[in-house]
Amino acid sequence: MTPPGSPTGIAIPTGQDPQQVSGQIAAFVDELVATGVLVDTDRPRRARRRWWQR
């Protein structure tokens, strides 16, 4: 059974190409990360420089 939120679960009922839908979803998520709406927790955090460490 295909999970309801997967690209295949979205594409197959509407007659679209699952690869194309997957790419569109990835681009949308990348845009949300770039604008700061989502945070990528797999990326290492940047070292914060405190004012006393300058």
Image (cartoon, rainbow, N blue to C red):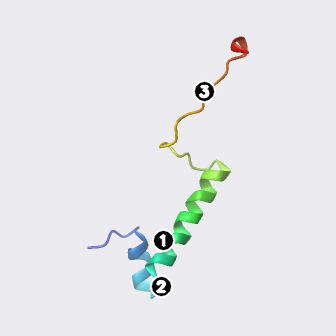
- Disc 2 packing (10 Å; few <14; some 14–19; many ≥20): few
Q: Secondary structure at mark 2?
A: loop
How far apart are the alpha carbons under marks 1 and 2? 11 Å
Q: Which residue is mark 3?
A: 47
How far apart are the alpha carbons under marks 2 and 3? 43 Å
Which residue is depicted at the point 60% across and 27% down? 47
- In the rendered image, the residue lying farthest to the left is 1
User: Which comes before the other along the chain, label 1 or label 2?
Assistant: 2
Q: x%, y% of residue 43?
A: 52, 42
Which residue is depicted at the point 40% across and 83% down? 12
Q: Nearer the viewer, mark 3 or mark 1?
A: 3
| Amino acid at pointer 3 | Ala
Q: x%, y% of residue 10?
A: 43, 76
Residue 45, relative to residue 15: is it above or below?
above
Q: Which residue is mark 2?
A: 16
Residue placed most toward the observer, 5 or 49: 49
User: Which comes before the other along the chain, label 2 or label 3?
Assistant: 2
Q: Which residue is mark 1?
A: 22
Q: x%, y% of residue 6?
A: 40, 69
How far apart are the alpha carbons under marks 3 and 1? 33 Å
Which corner quadrant of the image does residue 32 belong to?
A: bottom right
